[in-house]
Image (spheres, rainbow, N blue to C red):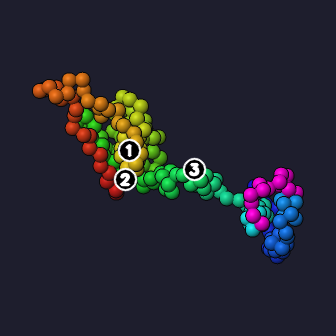
Amino acid sequence: MAQRSTDLPAIEAEIERIRSLGLEALRARWRSMLGAMPPMALTKDFIARMMAYRIQEEAFGGLDRATRKLLDGLAQGEKPGTDVKRRLKAGTVLVREYQGERHTVTVAPDGFVWRGTTYGSLSTIARAITGTAWGGPRFFGLRSAKSNQEDQEPDKPTAKPKHAGRVGASRGRARDRISEVQA
């Protein structure tokens, strides 16, 4: 949003005028500021607070994109911090054992190093290791416990095998191991 005026005394005076207006005058002022009537359920105090915020927003700038995204998520019932991505420092070593083979990935300033080659994303490495479309952070255990519980890993059976209970019919495998070492 473009900044209009940062004359602090003038902004304070305009906010004070808004506080002194009656309900009908506030509704009329709202209409002139925003081009529509405020919802009838809003109280005088709430209308005045929203208009004061709008004046300050026009003068000093609004919320940044990250803050708007956080507030939108909270309004939709998301828990704070669920969208925050883990930041990995260069030098961090990720270790994942998959199908009996240990895979070591080192975080570099320009990507991720696996088997001497630098890749732009963990997902590319996970796809190369498994041959299937995996989310790299999920494959290397960097997702929160909640998101890991919601998703089923492709190599885990989601239902009992058809011949479960028969001797020698075990189709499950030992759980792949995931570990992370900070440098």
Quadrant of the rendered image containing residue 137: top left
CA separation in Å, label 1 and label 2:
22 Å
User: x%, y% of residue 174?
Assistant: 21, 38
Residue 96 vs residue 56, the one in the foreground: 56
Residue drawn at (25%, 34%) of the image: 99
Which of marks 2 and 1 precedes in the sequence?
2
Q: Where is residue 43 in the image (x, y as percent from the top left)?
A: 75, 64
Q: Which amino acid does label 3 sit on?
A: Gln
Q: How crowded is mark 3: few (under 14 residues within 10 Å), some or many (20 or more)?
A: few
Where does label 2 land, which residue? 92
* Along the line of sight, the residue nearer the viewer: 159 or 59: 159
- Residue at the image position 45 percent from the left and 45 percent from the top: 111
SS at circle 3: loop
Q: Is residue 163 above or below residue 181?
A: above
Q: Distance between the residues labelled 1 and 3?
A: 21 Å
In this rendering, the answer to whether 35 lies above or below 46 is above
Which of disc 3 and disc 1 is earlier in sequence?
3
Q: Which amino acid does label 2 sit on?
A: Thr
Q: Main secondary structure of the magenta part?
A: loop
User: Residue 130 appears in which quarter of the rendering?
Assistant: top left
First in sequence: mark 2 or mark 3? 3
The image shows residue 181, relative to residue 129, as above or below, that is below
Tag 2 and tag 3, C-beta contact below 8 Å:
no
Q: Residue at x 78, y 56 (%)?
A: 40
Residue designated by label 3:
76
Task: Say which amino acid is labelled 1.
Answer: Asn
* Secondary element type, mark 2: loop
Task: State the residue position of label 1.
Answer: 148
Task: Determine if residue 144 is in view.
Answer: yes
Magenta-colored stretch includes residue 112: no
Is 30 left, or right, of 104 in this rendering? Answer: right
